[in-house]
Amino acid sequence: MRNTVKSCISGILALTLLLTAAIVAHGSDDVDISGIIADTAEYIRATITSPMEGQVGGDWAVIGLMRSGAAVPDKYIRGYYDRVAGRLEGVDGVLSPGKNSEYSRVVIAMAAIGADPRDAGGYDLLEPLMDYDTTLLQGVNGPIFALIALSCAGLGDEPVARRYIEAIVSRQLPDGGYAISGTISDPDTTAMAVTALARHRSQVDVTASIDRAVERLSKLQRESGGYTSYSSTNSESVSQAIIALCSLGIPISDSRFIKNGNSLLDNLLTYYIQGRGFEHEAGYGTNMMATEQALCALAALRRARNGANALYDMSDAPDLPPETPKDGLDGKHPDISVPDAVLPDVTFSDAGGHVSEPEIIALSKRGIINGYPGGVFMPDGKITRAEFAAVIVRALGLLRNGDKTVTFKDVPATSWFCDYAYSAYGYGIILGKGAEIFDPEGLIDRQEAAVMVFRAAALCGLTQPLDETAVRNILSQFTDYRTVASWAAEELAFCYYTGILGDEAIEIKPTQKILRCEAAEMVYMMLRNTQLI
């Protein structure tokens, strides 16, 4: 009976969305977008189960969800905060040495969830934005996002904010718009500049700049109601234009933004795929960045219609939910049970002062990783496949008799690692190296370790959608990214993206054998990111 009712409800929702889409085609400003917002928000929540710091699948997803009024569980919000705090701790507060928009984006998200960006896990995310010169290294993009972030944090009247306003105004192009580079404006940057300046439009020079930019934004609009940016007719440009108009209180039915009977909303919804978010370009399928930006745009529009705060006016943000028990993510495997830290404090003579000492001690107190006789840990020693499998199995409490449907000739029943090997295999964490070969004494390299941790994280409910472009963008920051095996590319990108692997070095060294200290760091960060410790 329950399934029947659920099916009926789903059918009604589907019919409602189809009818909504039909109404949208007539270009009205009073189209009910509530169903599309709810559907998009649910898609994002279901796809991005564990949001964290990052341009896609993280901060913007959280911003869109929080500002759209979607029902977001406290655990989801607090989990995002905790993962950002863990990421900051892992990089000692340095998200980027010279790209301050990384801080701006996280500041906006922190403000959206009601957290203090001046104390995010003990780190001041606003401090880098006070560095005017470094912020300007990104061209006009730097001050645009810095100004939005400072305004979100209630610091829009600070002297440095005024300098950013002047920097944006001074970079307006002769055609009235803005661009990341070149002398011809693009709609995205023009719209974002308008959004940044909107809260300061009472100033004469700012008002004139906004008026020229809005006029340019109107001229750039195509007959379809949308935009083409850098040869791409895409939805993100439309989303940014909607956010800009809403920030100024201009209705999307304004005659300047109706082309051939098509409004910005009409055009945006041509990219909508029911139950799967939004496309970047028509016909290319769901794109997460496009979906996140579309949700932000729809949230801005509904807020404007309801007379609520603008998208980036966070004075109505809720309080940050209190810290929640570390009982894992929704969707974790029911067999997972992390050991408590009940063992006496352990010290290793060769780990004291080591950069990985906190992670080593945290795991050893849970019996996840062990040292050697004589009170040593050998942090810079290598680790075998059997040892690494044992560490992960212990970390997740998955030690069983194991899946014996496959027999490994090199895993004796009397060996210490027998049950660990078969348990790791049974849960899909590690596979053999050929027919009936486990290779327990083989040393594990970085890309092999990344694959194992990736699979373990998935068991814990931590998944992250990374398409081919995202994988390439993440790995290409390293000089040797072309040496990564195709079977490990997504897994390595996942580990870097989630902070399981640090990205401070300039090389990945995918085939280099990992050290015991590195193994401890990876497993610890996986447990932390999955809210298990």
Image (cartoon, grey):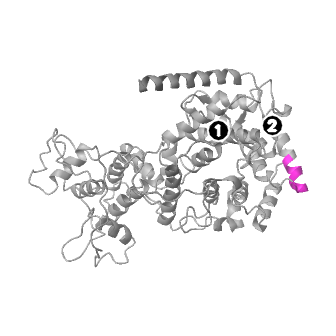
Identify the element where label 2 is drawn. Answer: loop
At x 51%, y 55%, the residue is 78
Binning the other alpha carbons within 10 Å of mark 2 as few (below 14), some (14 to 19) or many (20 upward) gives some
Q: Is residue 153 above or below residue 331?
A: below
Q: Position of residue 189 (x, y in %)?
A: 73, 46
Label drawn at residue 182: none
Q: Residues within 10 Å of mark 1 (few under 14, many from 20)?
A: many
Quadrant showing the C terminus = bottom left
Amino acid residing under circle 1: Ala
Q: Residue at x 70, y 25 (%)?
A: 24
> Start and end of the magenta stretch?
202-210
Please name the residue that numbered disc 2 is placed on. 251
Please name the residue that numbered disc 1 is placed on.
Answer: 294
* Vertical side of 20 occupied by 454: above or below: below
> Against 134, is 236 above or below?
above
Q: How many marks overall?
A: 2
In the rendering, at what x and y percent does residue 1 appear? 41, 23
Q: Name the residue: 61% across, 64% down.
A: 125
Q: Is residue 391 visible?
A: yes
- In this view, the residue in front, 118 or 337, is 337
Mark earlier in primary sequence (1, 2) = 2
Q: Is residue 454 toward the left or the right of residue 216 in the image?
A: left
Q: Is residue 95 magenta?
A: no
Q: Residue 370, position in %: x, y?
A: 24, 66
Asked if the stretch drawn in magenta spans residue 208, the answer is: yes
Q: Nearer the viewer, mark 1 or mark 2?
A: 2
